[in-house]
Image (cartoon, rainbow, N blue to C red):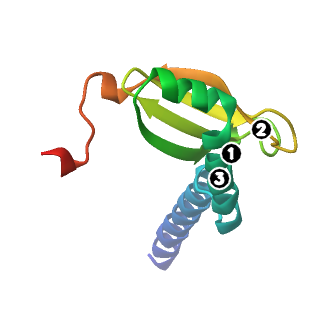
Amino acid sequence: MKSKIVLVLLIISLGLNIYLFGKQTIEQAYEPSAEEKVILSEMVQKTVESDDYKKLAKKENIIAIDSNMDKNKGGAFPYYFGVSVRTDKQTYIFSCNNDQCSQMENEEWTYSIYRDENPRLPFDK
């Protein structure tokens, strides 16, 4: 009887440890550290100063800017960082153009939630 209890506790303990290790590993791939948050903030500033952003701002209504990190995306530092610029038509994803991240360029674009929805801030009401 005691051996069954010990076996059950061992299995529960092992399962819990595997879960916690997996959760921590996954979060590290998407949640930026304090230093990475500073880097992302600087990348937002470089995005706003970039030529691609200025052209975009003249053509479309910019609603939001967000930074993100995805180490599972592949590539080395700083290529797993990105800055999303959301407009009422599309979301434009800016990334570094070289290893020193001297400039930000619009490399990708995707669907924008603002095509079907209004901005979420209630201040205009």
Nearer mark to the viewer, of 1 and 3: 1
Question: Which residue extends farthest left?
Answer: 125
The residue lying at 69 percent from left, 35 percent from top is 95
**Against 5, is 84 above or below?**
above
Question: Which of marks 1 and 2 precedes in the sequence?
Answer: 1
Q: Earlier in the sequence, mark 1 or mark 3?
A: 3
Tag 2 near tag 1, CB within 8 Å: yes
Cα–Cα gap, marks 1 and 3: 10 Å
Identify residue type, mark 3. Leu
Q: Depth check: give the residue in front, 59 or 119.
A: 59
How packed mark 2 is, by other alpha carbons closer than 10 Å (few <14, some 14-19, many 20 or more), is some
The disc placed on residue 23 is none
**Quadrant where the C terminus is found in the figure:** top left
Q: Quadrant of the N terminus?
A: bottom left
* Residue of label 3: 40
In the displayed structure, would residue 59 be above or below residue 68? above
Q: Earlier in the sequence, mark 3 or mark 2?
A: 3
Q: CA distance from mark 2 to mark 1?
A: 7 Å
Task: Tell whether label 3 touches label 1 (CB within 8 Å).
Answer: no
**Residue positioned 32% across, 28% down in the render:** 114
Which residue does the numbered mark 2 point to in the structure image?
Answer: 103
Q: Amino acid at mark 2?
A: Gln
Distance in Å between CA atoms under marks 3 and 2: 13 Å
The number of numbered badges drawn on the structure is 3
Question: As drawn, is 56 to the left or to the right of 98?
Answer: left
Residue 60 horizontal/vertical position (percent): 44, 23
Residue drawn 56% across and 46% down? 67
Q: Position of residue 39 (x, y in %)?
A: 70, 56
Q: Nearer the viewer, residue 5 or 34?
A: 34
Residue positioned most to the bottom: 2
Q: Which residue is mark 1?
A: 46
